[in-house]
Each structure stands twice: as C-alpha cells, then as structure tokens.
Amino acid sequence: MPLAPIALFVYNRLSHTKQTVEALQSNLLSKESELYIFADGPKSPKDYSAVEEVRKYLKTIAGFKSINIIHRPENFGLAKSIISGVTEIVNKYGNVIVLEDDLVTAPYFLKYMNDALDLYENDEAVASIHGYIYPVKGELPETFFIKGADCWGWGTWKRAWSIFEPDGKKLLNQLRKSKLTREFDFGGTYPYTRMLESQILGLNNSWAIRWYASAFLSKKLTLYPGSSLVKNIGMDATGVHSKKTGEYDSNLYNHPVSIAKQKITEDVYARKLMAAYFSTLGLDIATSKIKFFAKKIFLCLKNSKKL
C-alpha cells in the first residue's frame, strides 16, 4: 500500500516547528512520505514577522518524497485550517497522518501509523490511529482501543473522517439525549462536555472536541500505542487553548511497535488507567463547572456592553 501523506499545520512558532520537522525527518519512512504543510496567515499585523519567519524556514525543508507548502492567504485559525486541510487530503488520497507544529515524534511513529492505517483500513468500527498516550500509572498492552478519537499525532481515512460533525450544539444535544455525558467525560474525571459547551459559546474553537464527540457518538474506536510515540512540546502557553504545564509529558518510545490484528473492542482496563490519570489533573467536573459558568457570565456581560 502507498504510504499515507502527512499533513502538518503550522503558524508562527519557529522553534516548535523546527523541532517537529527535524523529528519527522529522523523517522523511518520519511524519505518515502509526501509532506503537506499548511501555513496559516497572520491574525494581525503584529503576527506578520513571526509568520514570515516560519514560512522562510519551510522553504529550506528537505528529506521527504515531496514537499507541498500551502500558504493560507489569510488567518484561518487552527480549527478551520485543520478541518479543511484534512478534508482536502483524505479526499485526494483516502487517508492522512496529521500533526501540528508542536508535536515531536519518535523514529518509528510513521511506521506505526502506516502499518495500523493499512491493517484497519476497511474496519468500519475504527475511526483513527493515535500516536500519543498519556503518562498513566500502570502497564498497558502494546496497542489497544479506546472509544472516540484523539488529536496529538493521529491518522484517519476518508470513510471515517466523513462522520466528523462540525456543529457542536448538535453533538451536545445527542450526548445529552442519549445520557452519555458522564461516559464522554471518562466517568466524570475530565470535563470534555464543558469543553464542548465552551466551543458552542465561542469560548474556544476546538476542532478536536468535535472530532472526539463525532467518533464517540458513532461508537467508533481509536487505536493507541501502549508507549507514546509523540511528545507535545507546546504546553508552554504558546499554543491555542493551552497553558504552561508538564502534566502531559510522556517519554518517547524509540522502538518499533508491533501491529497485529486484534479484537476491535474498547480496552476497559486501559480506559480505567486513563480515567485515573485524568483524576490527578485537578480538572474534575465540579471545578470545571465553576470555571465554565464564570466564563459564561463574563461573556454575557461583555456582549451586553456591546448592545
């Protein structure tokens, strides 16, 4: 099977982008892979210089089968850029591997992604392949399935991406109608429902929460590695929707991951380990509810002043 094309989304973080690209260049299969780089335009004149620095660097990149740079003529924002870029690539090739400019990959990331994308290509129950796993406490199998989808180094197919629902309100109504919000929140350990509510209100513009909800409601599963092949270096307050934290740091696994057909069902033990990890982050539902309504009140006051 042909290797899946890589879609890399960048903006104005030169140092992060360099680390992401250099890690990809060191990957097995990089020289045989087609790379598409979507470079977003500046939000305002003050962002122009940083954006241009990144675009200048992009011209120097080598080490791939082909390099295609798409310069956005204006600022799309991360959500629009990813949604449109992923749609464009899967419509052309049938599959895609997706990275953002702050994700450093292990040397066997591309092999893992391509092996798994090939193996599960025709399994309707599988929505995506994921390269990152949280630093949970406990032993995980080499690969396992979790219900839903994820966003830090992932791959999918045209058939699966077709279930993506951009309307957050529609997704939230479905979750509530089916009484699935607690399960969606990993037993109340992570405020995913609040994130979706915030997206609807315009407090965030997360494409990822809508991708997770779309796959979750469709009862689709995502394959994860037991050891992380991706490290997020953007948790330094430089990215969209992120604050400075080291809580998500995972050590990169610098060895091949064996991909073999397994039963396509959620790993209950792995899900419990993830929920236990989430509970250590201090992002429980009660706390997030207070923060959410504080933001909601602020938004209402802000809008009332405009009237």
Image (cartoon, grey):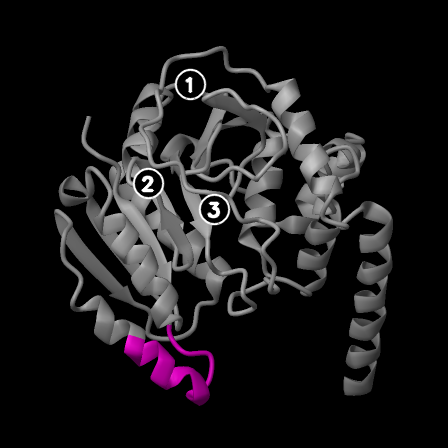
Q: Nearer the viewer, residue 305 or 41?
A: 41
Residue 152, numbered circle = 3
Between the C-alphas of marks 2 and 1, the distance is 16 Å
Evaluate if marks 2 and 3 touch, with contact meaning CB atoms under 8 Å apart: no
Q: Give x and y (percent) for residue 26.
A: 22, 47
Taking the magenta stretch, the answer to whether it contains residue 56 is no
Instruction: Quarter of the image for the N terminus: give it.
Output: top left
Residue visible at 25% across and 39% down in the picture: 93
Q: Nearer the viewer, residue 207 or 10?
A: 10
> Crowding near pointer 3: few (<14 within 10 Å), some, many (20+)?
many
C-alpha separation, residue under disc 2 versus residue under disc 3? 14 Å
The picture quadrant where one finds residue 276 is top right
Q: Quadrant of the C terminus?
A: bottom right
Residue lying at 29% horizontally and 35% vertically, measured from the top left: 108
Numbered disc 3: secondary structure: loop
| Element class at badge 1 | loop
Q: Which mark is residue 123?
A: 1
| Residue 4 falls left or right of residue 195 | left
Circle number at residue 260: none
Q: Residues within 10 Å of mark 1 (few under 14, many from 20)?
A: few
- The magenta segment is 41-53
Q: Residue at x 57, y 24 (%)?
A: 139
Q: Would residue 153 be visible to someone looking at this image?
A: no
In the rendered view, tell whether residue 7 sits above or below residue 205.
above
Disc 2 vs disc 1: Cβ atoms closer than 8 Å?
no
Q: Position of residue 81 (x, y in %)?
A: 42, 60
- In the picture shown, does residue 8 fall above or below 152? below
Q: CA distance from mark 1 to mark 3?
A: 22 Å
Label at residue 96: 2
